[in-house]
Image (cartoon, rainbow, N blue to C red):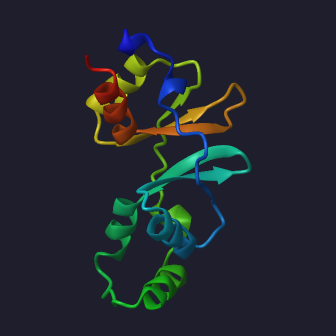
């Protein structure tokens, strides 16, 4: 059954991530260039937070945003850090988890991605609600 499948079946392992000391404009550039919405924030190899497009929007809401991306990047970097924007209440699951485990988390919360870690607590990958929906769609008879 699908629900007992290991999370590895839907795990994205080539995860783009940022280090906590990088600039917020680096995150914005990753979002723009790769058309993604979530990026794990690492300290060394361990995830300490996650940042999403919504997190950046929340920070920028009260600042007059210019159309020019360079202006937006300069404003972000001058006023904010990744730590300011990232969600610190990180939701993680071990690599041994099942699809049922991640379904429970995504179903009963407002988050759309879960960080997957190895036994050492280091980043293994990410699973998003889109990954889960695609997997379910691909396995419906």
Task: Report which quarter residue 72 is drawn in.
Answer: bottom left
Where's residue 83, x and y in %?
A: 54, 62
Query: Which residue is at a point 33% across and 69% down the rendered structure image?
Result: 57
The residue positioned farthest toward the front in the image shown: 141
Say whether residue 36 is visible: yes
Query: Which residue is at a point 52% across and 33% down the rendered structure image?
Result: 11
Task: Report which quarter residue 8 is drawn in.
Answer: top right
Q: Residue 18 or 1: which is nearer the viewer?
A: 1
Where's residue 51, x and y in %?
A: 47, 56
Image position of 122 with respect to 72: above or below = above
Number of dots carrying numbers: 0
Say whether residue 108 is visible: no
Image position of 38 with respect to 133: above or below = below
Query: Which residue is at a point 45% across and 91% down the rendered structure image?
Result: 71
Query: Which residue is at a point 49% across and 62% down the rendered structure image?
Result: 34
Image position of 75 with respect to 119: above or below = below
Q: Quadrant of the C terminus?
A: top left
Q: Is residue 48 left or right of residue 5?
A: right
Q: Residue 34 or 109: which is nearer the viewer?
A: 34
Image position of 86 with respect to 26: above or below = above
Q: Residue 28 or 50: which is nearer the viewer?
A: 28
Q: Is residue 102 left or right of residue 109?
A: right
Where's residue 68, x and y in %?
A: 40, 91
Q: Residue 73 or 60: which is nearer the viewer?
A: 73
Q: Quadrant of the N terminus?
A: top left
């Amino acid at each position: 059954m699908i629900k007992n499948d290991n999370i590895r079946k839907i795990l994205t392992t080539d995860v783009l991530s940022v280090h906590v000391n990088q600039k917020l404009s680096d995150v914005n550039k990753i979002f723009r260039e790769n058309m993604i919405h979530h990026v794990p924030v690492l300290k060394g190899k361990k995830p300490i937070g996650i940042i999403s497009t919504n997190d950046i929007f929340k920070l920028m809401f009260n600042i007059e945003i210019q159309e020019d991306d360079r202006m937006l990047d300069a404003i972000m970097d001058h006023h904010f850090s990744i730590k300011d924007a990232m969600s610190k209440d990180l939701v993680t699951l071990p690599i041994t988890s099942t699809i049922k485990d991640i379904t429970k988390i995504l179903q009963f919360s407002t988050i759309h991605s879960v960080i997957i870690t190895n036994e050492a607590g280091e980043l293994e990958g990410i699973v998003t609600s889109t990954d889960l929906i695609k997997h379910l769609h691909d396995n419906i008879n």
